[in-house]
Amino acid sequence: MTSHIATDRAANRLGALFMVAAMAGFAVEDAFLKAAAQSLPIAQVMVLFGAGGAMVFSLWLRAKSQPLAPTEVVSRPMQVRVVFEIIGRLFFTLSLALTALSSTTVILQATPLVVVAFAALVLGEKVGWRRWLAIAIGLIGVVLIVRPGGDSFSWLSLLAVAGMLGFAGRDLASRAAPASLSTAVLGLYGFLAIVVAGAAYGVIWEQVPFHTPPPMALLSVVGAVACGVFAYSALMRAMRTGEVSAVTPFRYSRLLFGVALGVVVFGERLDSFMLIGSALIVLSGLVIMWRGRTAS
């Protein structure tokens, strides 16, 4: 019995390490994309990043002798998932490029709260008053960060909120996606959605010609692809190592990495509203997870 408990604890520690590594990878990916967007059109950054990630996952699937386009990818849940992926990726990348990395990262952490709310409202899942209260408190944290009506409010700050809502819809649709679809297939079509989002934004809105990337910008895109694929792989490993309830809370380490990169690399400054809002979002997310393990 003692050895079994020790094995579980070791698996949980290993899963937590993989989760922290994944969140660090995603945070560095975001920083690379923000850096690339300083010298390249945003649409071009998205197309290059999406194409690079799609190529890696295509090679991954071919190496495993798995089909690139199984019939399940055209199922209704997958169609809905791709639409939300496009929305989430477009607005999240715009937020990275045009606003502070730190605030964008923090607002993204509210995604699990919105997923639970959507699951209750759309799928009819049972959510008790304690989790509804946690969701409300977390959303108050988002409002504190965005500060609509305040002197420092910018409409650009809503880009992160739109991206977060898109990712929440994607995650909810993923729960209804066919279980036979591998994580590599989901990764492939997730990156292809970025290509579509970037191309649509470039044609409809940005309308800036693509050009040969400067060496540093190209390196930034390559770094973003490498970090994104690494982070995705580490995330999948984390979710398959140890108990989900023990590993999942370490997702919030992305907030620490993202804020640190924003402050150190891009010279961003944090204020009291940002700190309080961040604390409310993280606390609410942890309460949601804990209540999900025990009761509604």
Image (cartoon, helix red, strand yellow):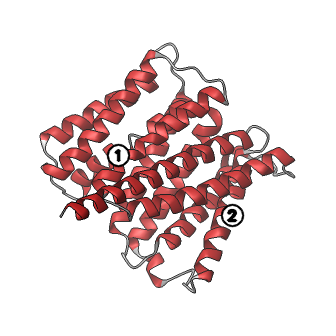
Quick check: 35 left or right of 120?
right
| Residue linked to disc 1 | 249
Where residue 243 sits in the image (x, y, percent)? 30, 59
Where residue 51 sits in the image (x, y, percent)? 68, 63
The one nearer the camera, 136 or 242, is 242
Q: Are marks 1 and 2 in contact (CB under 8 Å)?
A: no
Above or below, comparing residue 138 to residue 127 in the picture:
above
Where residue 218 sits in the image (x, y, percent)? 79, 51
Quick check: 61 left or right of 281?
right
Q: Is tag 1's residue or tag 2's residue first in the polypeptide sequence?
A: 2
Residue placed farthest to the bottom in the image?
65
Decide: few, some or many residues near mark 2? Use Cα within 10 Å; few <14, some 14-19, many ≥20: some
The one nearer the camera, 92 or 76, is 92
* Kind of residue at disc 2: Ala
Where residue 165 sits in the image (x, y, percent)? 42, 46
Q: Nearer the viewer, mark 1 or mark 2?
A: 1
- What is the quadrant of residue 81 in the picture? bottom left
| Residue linked to disc 2 | 51
* Kind of residue at disc 1: Pro
Instruction: Give the distance between the C-alpha atoms of the residues marked 1 and 2, in whole angstroms.
Output: 31 Å
